Image (tube, grey):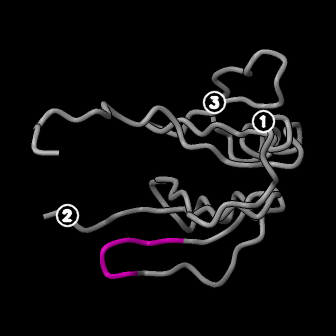
Amino acid sequence: MTDTTSLMTGVDYVALPTEDYERAAAFYGDTLGLPFVKRWGEMPAGEFQAGNLTLAVMQSEAFGREFRSGNTAVALQVDDVEAARTLLEQKGVTFQGDVLDSGVCHMAFFSDPDGNPLILHHRYAPKA
């Protein structure tokens, strides 16, 4: 395309597959504490707000899709990775490995109940 006008104007949401919508909704809403936005009518799907990103949790089979957990991690921004990790561990969340310091950010890796990879993330270095 040589035209500078993009066909896409933004990202509306990121879809996360689940085998059990109610279980996933409890995890994203109660365990992670993300604000619930709306349920998709009678469908086993709903939206949770993570700052400027909407996470749509969708029970795969209801949408004619075979369930497979995602492979791309969603990095959830927090002010303090260690503190957030401790709080989530107290709620039963299991993390993979120690907190990682990349030289520009701190990260802690975990998964939702369906195996979708998630990261607690805090960037401490300027984005220069």
Magenta-colored stretch includes residue 104: yes
Up-down: is 85 above or below 76?
below
The reply, left or right, for residue 98 in relation to residue 113 is: left
Q: Secondary structure at mark 1?
A: helix
Q: Which residue is mark 3?
A: 35
- 68 vs 33: above or below: below
The three-letter code of the residue at mark 2 reads Pro
| Residue position marked by numbered label 1 in the rendering | 63
Q: Which residue position holds label 2? A: 126
Q: CA distance from mark 1 to mark 2?
A: 41 Å
The front one of 87 and 67 is: 67
The location of residue 119, given as percent across then percent down, is 56, 64
Relative to 68, is 18 above or below?
A: above
Picture quadrant where residue 63 is located: top right
Q: Tag 3: Cα neighbours inside 10 Å, few (<14), some, or many (≥20)?
A: some
Give the x, y percent position of residue 26: 82, 40
Amino acid type shown at disc 3: Pro
Q: Is residue 32 magenta?
A: no
For residue 122, which quarter of the picture? bottom left
Q: Earlier in the sequence, mark 1 or mark 3?
A: 3
Q: Which residues are magenta?
A: 102-107
Image quadrant holding the C terminus, namely bottom left
